[in-house]
Image: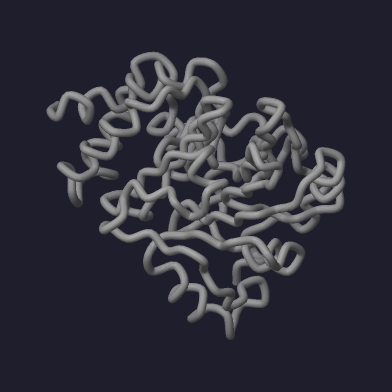
Amino acid sequence: MSSKLIPSDPSEVMVIRDITPNVVTLSVPFERFGMIHVGGRATLVRLTSGRWAVFSPVALTPDVKAKLAQMGGTVGYIIAPDFEHHIFITEWAKEYPEAKIIGPEGLPEKRAKAAGSDEKIGNEKFAYVYTPADKQFNQIDADFAKDFEVEYMESHPNKEIVCFYKPDRVLIQADLLFNLPAIEQYSRVPEAARNSHGFANKLFGGMQSTEGEAKGMKRFMWYVFSAKNRPSFNASIQRIEKWDFTTIVPCHGETMVGNGKDVFKKIFEWHLEGKK
């Protein structure tokens, strides 16, 4: 059940942070396999129209509602950027029923199958579902098209939807690029829990770190993430690199503020060149 994957009281451990005047992150602890501290993060983006988009929604706590009320506007888009980041769609859709739900191919069916057995997951209708036929489609409506560029990476194992928020030059993605360790996401967790499973986290974190030459991550991207369809993966990375972003907001690990383009070019060097 998805409820076992989330904190018992998200309000106690969530970090709400303004990345720019229009981009807010909601960071929480999250573990894979019950031990790997990858963290989780939702991103709130205020569009030029004043409406909000929420990417990879996490728990809609009273503090999050207060933050949205303080900044004005309503939620117009609920976006699951890949096959995994969707658990809280129902919670947000109930609060903002007019919001358009967006996700990758296969996700509506996955949620419909789980809806009968998982109390967190409903069977909401998706306004738009990305497929390989519309990899760069951003015409969800005029508001969305004005502020976002999109690249759908069906070649990614999790079917990744990468979005570029043009006004503040911010790249928003879920599992395309980790940046471990997840310091901010575990900053409000008791020290014993934060330091648990040290060896496993050090091992996995070494493969998902952008520090130094980041050879572990570069190899992971080349041999694992892109292995299924490397030509398509490379083409997507090359198109994304042309966007004028400076900051990258990942779901897992530290946000890359100001140096995002440099990190992206380092990690995806082989994909940009088309060869290792």
The image shows residue 141, relative to residue 107, as above or below, that is above
Percent of width and height locating residue 80: 52, 56
Residue 98 appears in view: yes
Near-viewer residue (256 or 171): 171
Q: Residue at x 67, y 39 (%)?
A: 46
Query: Along the line of sight, which residue is nearer the eye, 30 or 192?
Result: 30
Q: Which residue shows up at 42% across the image and 63% down it?
A: 129
- Outermost residue toward the left in this view: 275
Residue 105: x %, y % from top left: 37, 65
Q: Is 231 positioned to the left or the right of 45 in the image?
A: left
Q: Residue furthest front?
A: 142
Seen from the viewer's position, the closer of residues 101 and 18 is: 101
Q: Residue at x 49, y 39 (%)?
A: 148
Q: In the image, residue 185 lies at what x, y percent?
A: 66, 37
Location of residue 272 with respect to 106 vertically, above or below: above
Q: How is the image coloured?
A: one colour
Percent x, y for residue 256? 53, 23
Figure quadrant of residue 154: bottom left
Q: Residue at x 81, y 53 (%)?
A: 61
- Please indicate whether residue 38 sits to the left or right of residue 149 in the image: right
When the figure is inspected, residue 234 is found, relative to residue 131, above or below; the finding is above
Q: The C terminus appears in which quarter of the rendering?
A: top left
